[in-house]
Image (spheres, rainbow, N blue to C red):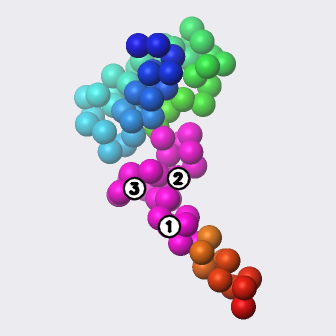
Amino acid sequence: MNARELLHFFSLRCCNRAQWEIRELALKMLEKVKKVAPKIFEKAGAACVVLGYCPETESCGRAPPLKEIIGTHRKGKAKRED
């Protein structure tokens, strides 16, 4: 894998909802690559950690799901328009 593919792999496989065996492997790999290329992988990890929201249909609870963030934004926008 190149760095771009590794970042994508980590975003999917470091997630709490990933199968535990692949998540364990991904976390060990992430630990190793951070030592080799710390600048490239400093923000690598589960997508919700990188994005600040969960892109999955169901969140593990680590970060709010995107639909919740959008809903909050829409409610705030509606209040301002009143």
Which residue is rendered at x = 72% and y = 91% of the image?
82
Give the mark nearer the N terminus: 3 vs 2.
2
Residue kind at label 2, given as amino acid type: Tyr
Which residues lie in the magenta part? 47-72
Report x, y in % for residue 19: 25, 36
Q: Are marks 3 and 2 in contact (CB under 8 Å)?
A: no
Q: Which mark is residue 53?
A: 2
In the displayed structure, 78 sits above or below 26; it is below
Taking depth in this image into account, of 74 and 19 the one nearest to the observer is 74
Report x, y in % for residue 39: 66, 19
- Find numbered disc 3 in the image and state the secondary structure of the residue it sits on: loop
Residue linked to disc 3: 59
In the displayed structure, 45 sits above or below 81; it is above
Q: Are marks 2 and 1 in contact (CB under 8 Å)?
A: yes
Q: Which mark is residue 68?
A: 1
The furthest residue to the front:
81
